[in-house]
Image (spheres, helix red, strand yellow):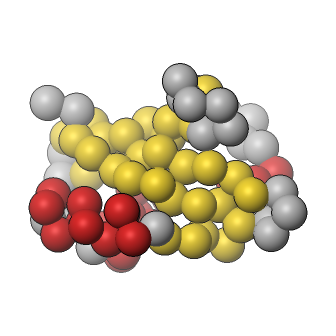
């Protein structure tokens, strides 16, 4: 997989993501491990966002990210299991 430049940028975690972490029982370490294990990405239906394909606890997950070129950070919007 040829990853874009924004893949190596620092992460910025949103308040929405922190709520989902509680709801879906994962933490920042889990999230970082999911991103390290990512197998691919594609454009999201919302312009400027991408879906990162990964796994967590042996199940497929998706992580929604939004690169911010002006700040050179990768904003993590949410993450969810594919059930």
Residue 29 at x, y = what percent?
36, 75
Q: Is residue 18 left or right of residue 5?
A: left
Residue at 61%, 27% (x, y): give it: 43
Which quarter of the figure has residue 44? top right
Residue 59 at x, y = what percent?
20, 40
Q: Quadrant of the N terminus?
A: top right
Residue 47 at x, y = what percent?
65, 31
Q: Quadrant of the C terminus?
A: top left
Front residue of 45/11: it is 45
Res 41 seen here: no
Front residue of 8/65: it is 65
Residue at 42%, 46% (x, y): give it: 63
Tally of marks: 0
Res 2 seen here: yes
Which quarter of the figure has residue 4? top right
Residue at 74%, 58% (x, y): give it: 68
Residue at 57%, 71% (x, y): give it: 12
Q: Is residue 3 left or right of residue 82?
A: right
Which quarter of the figure has residue 6? bottom right
Residue 61 at x, y = what percent?
30, 41
Q: Is residue 61 left or right of residue 50?
A: left
Front residue of 18/80: it is 18
Q: Is residue 25 above or below residue 48?
A: below
Q: Is residue 56 above or below residue 20?
A: above
Q: Is residue 62 left or right of residue 46?
A: left
């Amino acid at each position: 997989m040829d990853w874009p430049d924004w893949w190596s940028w620092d992460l910025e975690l949103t308040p929405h993501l922190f709520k989902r972490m509680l709801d879906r029982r994962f933490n920042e370490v889990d999230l970082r491990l999911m991103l390290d294990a990512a197998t691919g990405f594609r454009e999201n239906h919302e312009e400027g966002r991408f879906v990162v394909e990964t796994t967590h606890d042996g199940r497929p997950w998706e992580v929604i990210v939004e690169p911010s070129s002006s700040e050179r950070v990768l904003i993590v919007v949410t993450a969810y299991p594919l059930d």
